[in-house]
Image (spheres, grey):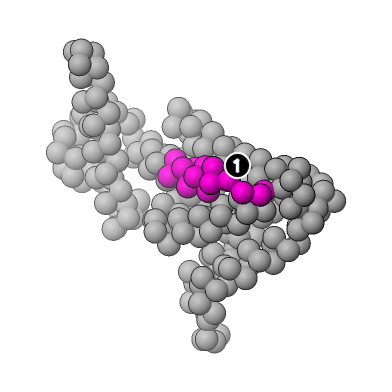
Amino acid sequence: MSANERREREKQERRESILDSAEQCFFSKGYERTAMDEIARGAQLSRALLYVYFKDKAAIMRGLMLRAGQQLLTRFQAAQAAGGSGLEQLQRIGWSYYQFSVEAPDYFDLLTDASTFSHLVDSDEQLQELASCYDQSMACMIQSLTDGVADGSLHPERVADPVLTACYLRGALHGVILQTRQPDPCEQPQMPAEQLIGYTLQMLNHSMRA
């Protein structure tokens, strides 16, 4: 390994250690109550060195949102790459989204709250990469919808616009996932989360099936 390669690896390791420390702080006590000094201590770095990698606390939060977006994209890509009909791909993508919310709930919350995070207006490379992750995740769904129309598993009239259909499917499933994470205000017995998600996916797929 060359000296330049070693330096780049060390820089990446420091960056990841900062994000790891911030993740623990943000998820345990909240973004607003976390100080940069705490993140620096957790990463075993000086506060001054922290600012070499991230210009402020908001930039660190954007880094964590990017990490979450990358994890979700990996799940979507794996679900699509497993093959099968377009309808089967969509079924797996839907389950992968739910599993992400269960297995990585803090990351799921980060992406849910991203639209209301005021510092997202401060555009940087991380934000551009996060937007790319979102676009690629949607592209997985759009491609599966297109594949489904082509292979006959989805009705072309019910998927007239794959882009709008992908937005509808993701929004509908996201809403149901949020419902499974909230207590019932009327204190009525709740349907098991996986049963509700399965039923939702069944109904969504039925609405598009050829």
> Residue 101, image x and y in percent?
46, 59
Q: Secondary structure at mark 1?
A: helix
- Front in this rendered view, residue 140 or 133: 140
> Residue 127, image x and y in percent?
48, 34
**Helix, strand or loop for the magenta stretch, by majority:** helix
- Front in this rendered view, residue 103 or 107: 103
Residue indicated by mark 1: 140
Q: Look at 50% across and 77% down and name the residue there.
A: 192
- Which quadrant holds residue 104? bottom left
Which class describes the residues within 10 Å of circle 1: few (<14), some (14-19), or many (20+)?
many
Q: Look at 35% across and 51% down and name the residue there.
A: 31
Res 37 seen here: no
Quarter the N terminus occupies: top left
Magenta segment range?
Answer: 69-86
Q: Is residue 128 above or below residue 163?
A: above
Q: Is residue 121 above or below residue 75?
A: above
Classify residue 149 as left or right of residue 199: right
Dot 1 amino acid type: Cys
Classify residue 21 as left or right of residue 171: left
